[in-house]
Amino acid sequence: MGAYTGFLDLALGLASRALGLVASGAGLGAVFFASTLIVLCAAVIAVRLLYAPLLSGNAVGLRACRTVSPVRARALWDHRHTRERACA
């Protein structure tokens, strides 16, 4: 929880100043454009993390077995099933 609040404070502290610089240099419309780009980059990272292996070694990733739903993959991760049992 401490890492979350630390990074949140860091992000809020840096983002507000950075967007202020963007607004002073390019106008208020550029702030919304920059925010859109940041959100799109965050979405790409989220999708990559979703399709990454859930465990190291004999991990069950969503690419490893296409029939595993995200809910089932999470359950498999929680119970530490192997790849063979997940795709069976």
Image (cartoon, grey):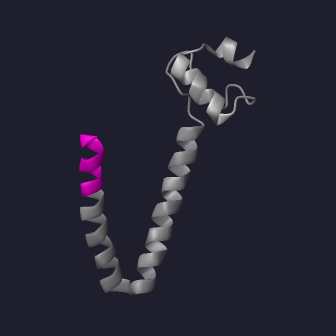
First to last magenta residue range = 1-9
For the C terminus, the image quarter is top right
Asked if the magenta segment contains residue 10, the reply would be no
| Residue at the spot 74% in from the left edge and 30% down from the top edge | 66
| Residue at the spot 24% in from the left edge and 48% down from the top edge | 6
27 in relation to 11, above or below: below
Relative to 5, 81 lies left or right? right
Residue 84, horizontal then vertical, whole percent? 68, 12
Residue 54, horizontal then vertical, whole percent? 53, 27
Residue 14, horizontal then vertical, whole percent? 26, 63
* In-front residue for pair 85/21: 85
Q: Quadrant of residue 28?
A: bottom left
| Residue at the spot 48% in from the left edge and 54% down from the top edge | 42
Q: In which quarter of the image is residue 53?
A: top right
Q: Could you tell me what secondary structure mostly forms the magenta stretch?
A: helix
88 in relation to 66, above or below: above
Image label count: 0
| Residue at the spot 55% in from the left edge and 51% down from the top edge | 44
Residue 8, horizontal then vertical, whole percent? 30, 54
Q: In which quarter of the image is residue 81?
A: top right
Relative to 1, 78 lies left or right? right
For the N terminus, the image quarter is top left
